[in-house]
Amino acid sequence: RVFGVHRFIATSFGVLLLFFPQALNDSMATAHRALPAEEGFTLRSWGCFCLGVGYIAHAAQAFELKVQREVARGMAICFSCATGLSLWPLCSANFSSDLRRGAVGTGVFYAALLVAYTAGLLLDNDLPEKRKK
């Protein structure tokens, strides 16, 4: 189930980042500011990455259960690191309040995905034997 939900989330963010980086930037900033070309390029690059993750999550639904677990572990590791990284601006005085606000938003998002994948891995042990491959 986590893969099914995550494919839509990742693909949606990928499209937003790729085609509407200014709108996404504005949603995380306290005030509108023009998006420098370098940042726009970086956000669009992340959009391409998110589209790839969306496809992986989509395809993983058809994988054997053992392979699904390995993909889920990889996603959990990824979102664990991303959640930790999002805490960095909150712990340092070197970051602006806008960046801190954005870090909180992305940190909550990454933490939710971490919880979803971790819960999926932990609850997977309760699946009926006939579903396990």
Image: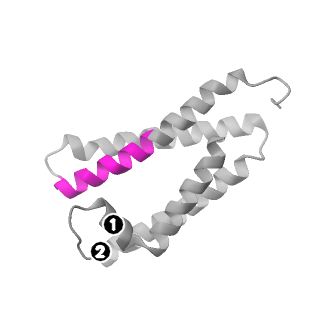
Residue under label 1: 25
* In the image: residue 40, left or right of residue 57: left
Assign the N terminus to one quadrant of the image: top right
Image coordinates for residue 45, horizontal then vertical, percent = 47, 68
Residue at the extreme right: 130
Q: Magenta span covers which residues?
A: 95-111
Find out whether the residues at labels 2 and 1 contact each other: C-beta distance under 8 Å.
yes
Image coordinates for residue 63, horizontal then vertical, percent = 77, 44
Relative to 59, does residue 115 appear above or below in the rendering?
above
Q: On the image, which quarter does residue 2 sit in?
A: top right
Relative to 99, does residue 113 appear above or below in the rendering?
above
Tell me the kind of residue under disc 1: Asn
Q: On the image, which quarter does residue 31 sit in?
A: bottom left
Residue 68 visible in rendering: yes
Residue 35 is marked as 2
Report helix, strand or loop for mark 2: loop
The main secondary structure of the magenta stretch is helix
Of the image marks 2 and 1, the number of the one nearer the N terminus: 1
Residue at the extreme left: 93
Q: Residues within 10 Å of mark 1 (few under 14, many from 20)?
A: many
* In the image: residue 15, left or right of residue 89: right
Confirm whether the magenta stretch covers residue 1: no
Relative to 16, does residue 57 appear above or below in the rendering?
above
* In the image: residue 72, left or right of residue 81: right
Q: On the image, which quarter does residue 35 sit in?
A: bottom left
Q: Residue at x 46, y 40 (%)?
A: 112
* In the image: residue 80, left or right of residue 56: left
